[in-house]
Image (spheres, helix red, strand yellow):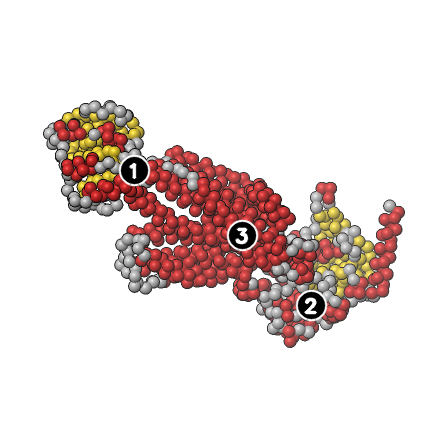
């Protein structure tokens, strides 16, 4: 399915995830194998209910898999205890959410430093400065999230995800709550994170325009990886998505 | 992380206030007690009334803190449920469960310390109010006028310690739950329900504890072991708390039925809402329950004591004329009731009987005994005797009546032969009747009673110590009393006492004590009402979106407010029914235990009074919901619908 397994930041090997029990079981992931290369921006796309978010949660170690294995770098996530998973989140993973999830009581700067404070780590001044410049929030650091625009809030969230120099940044529909200008801004930022800061970004989205910013797109349908596109453009992604939708409709008509 | 707790608190003052109020009231009572005590000690006042006051206060403060712990627990659980997303985010950022637990505890501690300090300041106010009360004429002896209130380092330390410990302990369970927040909840807005999974173990434990507590009450009553009631109450409380989520639903369904009928849609929604988070409803209702249980316990117990006392007062003579002092005037020396005074009294048309009694210190079976001689038939007619063995019918020569405690001391039973000596040697009497010795009003009740003829023959003192009078039929007691007063006017050292007098002296004393106890325990109810304010405030916050929807769908603002008030009313009713039920049950147990004590009671349920307590509690619940109801009715539709 995937072309490259070398230098993978995250790897899923035959993972399966079921929700519910008995007759109401939903197969969210069906034997998924995928490798997300380090230093690249990967988008995971699929219609709602396709399992794309579940895949993200499993890759990030937030959900346990029923079978198969997830490797973050060399680490087998299924072998980790709850505490070790927490430590892993703390040091090697960053998250960006659809709904920003900033703490309104803290200033922008404090929100940014929060992961480091939780980990009890000393902030790396150079790195922090680079991150703050990348997200263009230098003059907004003293403000509360409530005083920032939606775009600024999400950029701050990205900065928070980068603060600990994680191995992978996972973003779940990061542009879902942004207008088109702020969306483009944010996606450009994620792009720069990869190009200029050497980060690895994995993003779930349903927006072909967002996928265009990625190096690769994984297409998921019904819990399975059904395709991959390298150096995507919005046009090609849209075409692919429509094609799949048509194919699906035909299948539905036939059956 | 600790810094984060402080920032969080500063950003959410209302949240901190909701959790802290309960501690403030409890600490205010406890520290007020300590300040008053230290002030009294410093002023050199040692007074049993002040001591009693301090004891009551300490109990009231303790109960207020207990109720407070319930409320803190519920409020924190609800607040943390609302913060699920935030906690989940912290987990995503790598916070360990342990760190979240520490953060919640640190928040609790910070609130506890601040609330304790506020409570301490209020406590000084409480002490000032109490000093005024002590100085008022109500209490005898003590005088703290001019004394400055003394706040010792010990008071400050105790206040801080008590408040913080209660706060942190109450935060344990919520903190544990917070630490289990799933990181995934940060991604999707999970419903912020505070209801926990229903666990069979919890239910079974609750049933066993509550069952043991309730069963212990009749056991304590039968065996007369009063101290057993305390652990029984603790067990019942713990059991009810555990059973709460299961018990709340049927109780709310029942209590909500009439509400839904009368208020229609808002009432029906209120009923459904109260059943939606049964754990929170149960915890709020049980916090109110504790205060109400205490108040109804005391109400029933005092009523029972008064009922018993009333029966005793009713057995006293209509009017007593006696040498020296009486129960209400204090002991003083005086001459005997002279023969011509007796003649004058006998001549009064307002009286139907005048029964002179004479007493002499002699011996019975070799031990000192005050022997009283009177016309037995007349005596039994004028003064009621509660006969426990034998009969008053036989008043022939050689008969002896004694009080039950005397009979028990000597091991006498009806028919026993008792040697009596009034100075002319032993003479054997037959025990014919045993009557209950009076516990509260014993002044006119002798320990030993024999016929006048036998008394004289034995050489008893001829002076009449007291005359028991009976008011003639159709004559008002006050008229008879006035006539007797006029007749006695010429004889110094003679006191007159009528039944109304005795009643006010004894029942009045109990009423004063009762009102003090009840006033202080009402504070526990006050803390319970704080719980209603908290719960309703939190549910309004929880349901902003829903309220907006209802408003958009055509419910007017008045109806929204009514819905919130109705929910508070239903919770108040559940708390009142449980509280009054358990309070009465334990009061029954205590009354039965006290039946065999020196302060006996006659179990009586003041139905009207308890109904009043219930009505006031439910109404207070509605009043407590006023603010949350207002914010519910002011909900902004657009913002509510936009809220996540």
Would you call the spot at circle 2 few (<14 residues within 10 Å), some (14-19), or many (20 or more)?
some
The part of the image, by quadrant, that contains residue B121 is bottom left
Q: CA distance from mark 3 to mark 2?
A: 41 Å
- Residue contact at pointers 3 and 2, CB within 8 angstroms: no
Residue at figure coordinates x 24%, y 24% from the top left: B394
The residue carrying mark 2 is A150
The residue carrying mark 1 is B475
Residue at figure coordinates x 26%, y 26% from the top left: B392
In the image: residue B6, left or right of residue B231:
right
Residue B622 numbered mark, or none: 3
- Residue contact at pointers 2 and 1, CB within 8 angstroms: no
Of residues B247 and B383, which is closer to you in this image?
A: B383
Q: Quadrant of the C terminus of chain B?
A: bottom right
Q: Secondary structure at mark 2?
A: helix
Labels in figure, total: 3
Q: Residue furthest front?
A: B349
Residue B23, given in percent of the width and then of the height, sits at: 46, 57
């Amino acid at each position: 399915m995937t072309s490259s397994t070398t230098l993978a930041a995250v790897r899923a090997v035959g993972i399966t995830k079921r929700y519910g029990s008995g007759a109401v079981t939903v197969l969210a992931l069906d034997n998924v194998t995928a490798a997300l290369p380090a230093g690249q921006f990967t988008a995971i796309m699929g219609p709602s209910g396709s399992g794309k978010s579940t895949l993200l949660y499993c890759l990030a170690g937030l959900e346990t898999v029923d079978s198969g294995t997830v490797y973050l770098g060399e680490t087998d996530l299924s072998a980790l205890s709850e505490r070790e998973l927490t430590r892993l989140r703390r040091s090697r993973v960053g998250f960006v959410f659809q709904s920003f999830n900033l703490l309104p009581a803290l200033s922008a700067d404090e929100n940014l430093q929060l992961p480091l404070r939780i980990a009890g780590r000393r902030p790396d001044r150079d790195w922090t400065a680079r991150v703050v410049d990348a997200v263009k929030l230098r003059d907004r650091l003293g403000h509360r999230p409530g005083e920032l625009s939606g775009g600024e809030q999400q950029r701050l969230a990205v900065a928070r995800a980068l603060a600990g120099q994680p191995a992978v940044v996972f973003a779940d529909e990061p542009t879902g709550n942004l207008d088109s200008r702020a969306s483009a801004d944010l996606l450009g930022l994620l792009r720069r994170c990869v190009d200029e800061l050497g980060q690895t970004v994995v993003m779930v989205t349903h927006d072909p325009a967002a996928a265009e910013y990625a190096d690769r797109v994984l297409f998921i349908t019904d819990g399975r990886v059904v395709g991959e596109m390298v150096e995507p453009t919005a046009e090609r992604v849209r075409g692919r998505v429509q094609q799949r939708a048509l194919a699906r409709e035909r299948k539905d008509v036939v059956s | 992380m600790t810094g984060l707790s402080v920032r969080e608190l500063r950003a959410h003052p209302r949240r901190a206030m909701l959790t802290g109020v309960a501690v403030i009231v409890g600490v205010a009572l406890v520290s007020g007690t300590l300040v008053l005590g230290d002030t009294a000690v410093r002023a050199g006042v040692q007074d049993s009334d002040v001591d009693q006051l301090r004891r009551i206060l300490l109990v009231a403060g303790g109960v207020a803190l207990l109720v407070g712990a319930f409320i803190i627990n519920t409020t924190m659980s609800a607040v943390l449920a609302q913060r699920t997303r935030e906690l989940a985010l912290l987990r995503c950022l790598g916070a360990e469960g342990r760190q979240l637990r520490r953060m919640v505890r640190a928040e609790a501690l910070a609130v506890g310390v601040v609330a304790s300090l506020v409570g301490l300041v209020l406590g000084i106010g409480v002490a000032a109010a109490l000093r005024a009360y002590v100085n008022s004429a109500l209490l005898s002896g003590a005088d703290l006028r001019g004394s400055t209130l003394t706040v010792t380092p010990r008071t400050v330390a105790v206040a801080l310690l008590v408040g913080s410990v209660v706060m942190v302990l109450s935060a344990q369970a919520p903190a544990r739950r917070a630490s289990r927040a799933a990181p995934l909840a940060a991604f999707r807005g999970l419903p912020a329900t505070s209801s926990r999974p229903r666990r069979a173990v919890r239910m079974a434990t609750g049933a066993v504890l509550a069952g043991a507590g309730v069963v212990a009450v009749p056991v304590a009553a039968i065996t007369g072991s009063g101290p057993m009631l305390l652990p029984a109450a603790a067990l019942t409380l713990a059991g009810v708390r555990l059973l709460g989520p299961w018990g709340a639903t049927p109780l709310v369904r029942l209590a909500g039925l009439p509400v839904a009928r009368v208020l229609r849609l808002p009432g029906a929604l209120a009923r459904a809402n109260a059943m939606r988070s049964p754990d929170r409803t149960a915890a709020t209702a049980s916090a109110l329950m504790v205060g109400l249980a205490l108040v109804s316990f005391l109400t029933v117990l005092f009523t029972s004591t008064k009922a018993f006392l009333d029966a005793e007062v009713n057995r006293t003579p209509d009017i007593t004329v006696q040498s020296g002092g009486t129960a209400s005037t204090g002991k003083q020396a005086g001459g005997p009731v002279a023969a011509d005074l007796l003649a004058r009294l006998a001549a009064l048309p307002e009286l139907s009987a005048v029964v002179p009694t004479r007493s002499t210190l002699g011996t019975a079976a070799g031990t000192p005994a005050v022997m009283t001689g009177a016309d037995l038939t007349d005596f039994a007619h004028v003064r009621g005797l509660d006969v426990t063995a034998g009969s008053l019918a036989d008043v022939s020569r050689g008969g002896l009546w004694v009080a039950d405690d005397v009979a028990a001391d000597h091991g006498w039973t009806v028919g026993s032969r008792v040697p009596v000596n009034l100075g002319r040697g032993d003479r054997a009497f037959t025990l014919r009747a045993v009557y209950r010795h009076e516990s509260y009003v014993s002044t006119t009740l002798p320990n030993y009673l024999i016929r006048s003829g036998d008394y004289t023959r034995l050489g008893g003192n001829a002076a009449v110590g007291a005359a028991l009078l009976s008011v003639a039929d159709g004559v008002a007691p006050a008229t008879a009393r006035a006539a007797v007063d006029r007749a006695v006017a010429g004889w110094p050292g003679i006191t007159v006492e009528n039944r109304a007098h005795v009643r006010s002296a004894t029942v009045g004393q109990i009423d004063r004590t009762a009102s003090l106890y009840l006033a202080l325990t009402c504070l526990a109810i006050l803390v319970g009402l704080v719980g209603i304010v908290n719960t309703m405030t939190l549910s309004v916050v929880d349901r902003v979106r829903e309220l907006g929807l209802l408003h958009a769908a055509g419910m007017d603002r008045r109806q929204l407010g009514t819905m919130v008030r109705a929910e508070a009313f239903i919770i108040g009713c559940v708390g009142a029914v449980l509280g009054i039920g358990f309070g009465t049950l334990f009061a029954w147990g205590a009354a039965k235990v006290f039946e065999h004590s020196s302060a006996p009671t006659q179990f009586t349920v003041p139905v009207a009074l308890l109904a009043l307590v219930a009505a006031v509690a439910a109404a207070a619940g509605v009043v407590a919901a006023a603010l949350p109801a207002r914010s519910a009715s002011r909900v902004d539709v657009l913002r509510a619908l936009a809220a996540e």
